[in-house]
Image: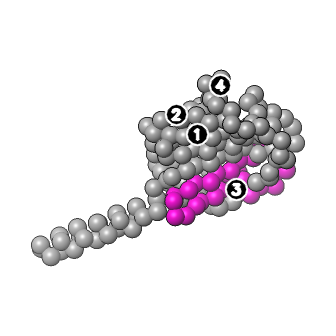
Amino acid sequence: MKKILSSIVVMLILAQSVMGQGKKISTITMGRTPCMGRCQVYDIELHANGKVIYTGRQFVKHMGVYEKNIGKKTIAKLFAAFSKYQIDTCQNEYSSNLMDGAGMYYIIDYGSNKKEIQKAHFGPAKLEELAQLIDKTIQVNNKWKKTASIEAPLRSR
């Protein structure tokens, strides 16, 4: 009985260490891409140290690159939401026959590897829920530091 219990404990420890490898999020980038109309186009980078970089590209109130540290706790809550939804199990790209509409993508950096989700707006509802959570949490205003202007052409994802 002790051998069986010991074996189970060892297997659980090994399973936890394998599941935890490379799954600590260091950066999340969420971007909204152009549509045929006046859709807002921007990227938001969330860093584990609390730093946020917002790049307003088109049809947004704040054009350019802005930075602010919103704190590790706030970032940790956002990262926890991504982990809860098991974002790493999503497809790398979703597709649809729709031609117009605002697009969305994610890049999740786990340090040693990255997970990219292209056309996330066609994916599961949880991807839009996470985007709304980021948008609700990240509100660029005059307390943010503008670090650069944007004049480059829009990138398509």
CA separation, marks 1 and 2? Answer: 7 Å
Q: Is residue 17 magenta?
A: no
The residue that disc 1 covers is 52
The quarter of the rendered structure image containing the C terminus is bottom right
Magenta highlight range: 94-122
User: Dot 3, how many residues are within 10 Å of its Cα: few (below 14), some (14-19), or many (20+)?
Assistant: many
Labels 1 and 2 touching (C-beta < 8 A)? yes
The residue that disc 4 covers is 141
Choose the circle earlier in sequence order: 1 or 2.
1
The residue that disc 2 covers is 70
Q: Is residue 47 above or below residue 17?
A: above
User: Looking at the image, which residue is at 49% across and 53% down?
Assistant: 25
Choose the circle earlier in sequence order: 1 or 3.
1
- Amino acid at the residue labelled 2: Ile
Q: Pick whichever, 149 or 128, lies toward us.
A: 149
The residue that disc 3 covers is 118
At mark 3, the secondary structure is loop
Residue 136: image quadrant is top right
x and y percentages locating residue 145 in the rendered image: 64, 31
- Amino acid at the residue labelled 1: Val
Labels 3 and 2 touching (C-beta < 8 A)? no
x and y percentages locating residue 81 in the rendered image: 49, 44
At mark 1, the secondary structure is strand
Residue 132 in view here? no
